[in-house]
Amino acid sequence: MIPISIVGAGPGAIDLLTLRASDRIKNAEVLLWADSLVSPEIARLAPKDSEQIKTSSLTLEEIIPILIDRCKGGKRVVRLHDGDPCLYGALTEQICALADAGIEVEVVPGVSAYQATAATLKAELTIPGLVQTIVLTRAEGRTGKPQKENLENLASIGASLCIYLSARHVEEVEKTLLKYYSEDTPVAIGYRVSWEDQWINVVPLKKMASASRDRGLNRTTLYIISPTITSTGSRSKLYTPSHKHLFRPEKTINSNTQLDE
């Protein structure tokens, strides 16, 4: 049997697909896609004669039998997720269910919304001397979280904090974050990042909730809380003349030497 491909469609824009993702979609004979989150333009890359099944109204108990049936029928099956399947994509549940049916799975990564948001803002989230850690998380919501991963613990690190799936809980999130970040810490709010109706705005933390309410945000929204968003930062030691490594041995610099950098 041909392995089922679980493919990350990225945040929305068709040109942010990886080459591998594009190849799998273009060669799909059966495409099951999250139509509430994935751009129809991406789904249209699949062949016109392919079977295309929208999954926004289906449960996992309905999706898995379709995947098994089409795969065992010898079809090239693609399960198309938004973003990256490894983040909040019910990936493990699907792989385990398919493994029980004797079906192998290929996972194709996709660009995540936090990456696309940072790129749009031309923001580095790991500036030397300021922040060197990125945390990806979500508010507790219905899914729940391990106690050790509660927002208070994560916020206390002071890292670049990327919060998914939490627009409905933004007031509570803001209140918690204000205990650990200054009220003027920049927050990037990204709605439908890389879609045609994309909205990205940077506000101080103290206005995170009010800006969300004013915009009417309740889904497909990402928050990045980080001082790096508006910081020029400091220079990395990696490219300084004094830093040597395997591919750039230490150089002796005398007073007559001019540096190009």
Image (tube, helix red, strand yellow):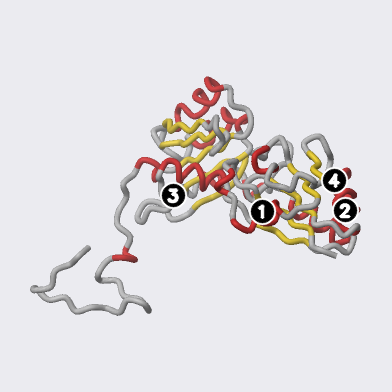
For disc 3, the marked residue is: 125
Q: CA distance from mark 4 to mark 3?
A: 37 Å
The residue located at (31%, 64%) in the rendering is: 237
The numbered disc on residue 70 is 2
What's the amino acid at mark 1?
A: Cys
Judge left or right: residue 167 versus residue 26: left
Which element type, helix, strand or loop, lies under badge 1? loop
Left or right: 60, with 134 as reference point: right
**Looking at the picture, how far across and down is residue 86, in whole percent?**
66, 53
Name the quarter where the C terminus is drawn.
Answer: bottom left
Q: Are marks 1 and 4 in contact (CB under 8 Å)?
A: no
Q: Is residue 246 visible?
A: yes
x 36%, y 40%: residue: 230
Kindly report the distance in space between the C-alpha atoms of the residues bearing marks 2 and 3.
42 Å
Looking at the image, tell me whether mark 2 or mark 3 is earlier in sequence order: 2
The residue under label 1 is 86
Number of numbered labels in the structure image: 4
Give the residue displayed 63% in from the left and 58% down from the top: 20
Residue at mark 2 to residue at mark 1: CA–CA distance: 23 Å
Query: Where is residue 161 shown, x and y percent of the image?
Result: 51, 45
Residue 93 visible in rendering: no
Give the mark toward the camera: 4 or 3.
4
